[in-house]
Amino acid sequence: MWTIHQFPLCPFSRKVRILLREKGVPFALQRLDPWKAADDFFDMNHAGRVPVVEETEKGIVLSDSTAICEYFEETVDKAPMINGSALNRAEIRRLVALFDENLYADVTGPLLHERMKKRLVLRQPPDSRMLRETMKNAHAHLDYIDWLVDNRQWLGGATLSLADLACASQLSVADYLGGIDWKGHDQTRHWYSVMKSRPSFR
């Protein structure tokens, strides 16, 4: 069985967990607090970041959420998440990168630092100026997601895709940390409620 070494509030860990549930791949969870990573974890992933998935019987260790998702996309036929024409697959990958990189850098990452790391690790109060800036950035991203929802059945096209999983994973962490103001973003809020209702998301 696969084991996911992960941190519950890591959006990239969430993306992998949701993908594996959508594909029906059984797994166990091993919690790893990023600030407590031991040497044996760095042996699995030299970047020192979660998630890492491991299959000990086969001697397989995979790191980086994008590489992990691509591996299961290529090896598990059920519920394809990078699908359609070559052009559509490129669009899905573009959106996954946008959410994993830009949405994380502008919104989820700063919220994790201000509301989680500062409280649990640094024992410092959050920076209110940074939180205001983060919420402003969130509105800009939600505007774009609103546009995607208005013009497509799902974010990446006609079917559920890895783009939806990546975006929902980021927003779920940001929303939990109080960084999302849904006012004026009914399209994204409805799409997000649909995502949250999926068994894989629960």
Image (tube, rainbow, N blue to C red):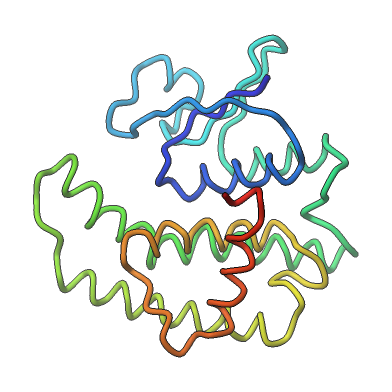
Q: Relative to residue 194, is residue 16 depicted above or below?
A: above
Q: Relative to residue 107, is residue 100 depicted above or below?
A: above
Q: Residue at x 62, y 46 (%)?
A: 18
The N terminus appears in which quarter of the rendering? Answer: top right
Foreground residue among 195 and 45: 195
Q: Relative to residue 20, is residue 182 depicted above or below?
A: below
In the shown orientation, is residue 136 left or right of residue 93? left
Quarter where residue 138 is shown: bottom left
Residue 31: give x, y in percent of width and height: 42, 29
Q: Residue at x 60, y 42 (%)?
A: 16
Residue 128: give x, y in percent of width and height: 15, 70
Residue that lies at the very extreme toward the bottom in this rendered image: 184
Residue 15: give x, y in percent of width and height: 58, 48
Q: Relative to residue 164, is residue 121 depicted above or below?
A: above
Residue that lies at the very extreme toward the left in this rendered image: 124
Quarter where residue 26 is shown: top right
Quarter where residue 198 is shown: bottom right
Residue 86: give x, y in percent of width and height: 87, 62
Q: Residue at x 76, y 37 (%)?
A: 24
In the shown orientation, is residue 73 left or right of residue 145? right
Q: Residue at x 64, y 27 (%)?
A: 27
State the count of labels: 0
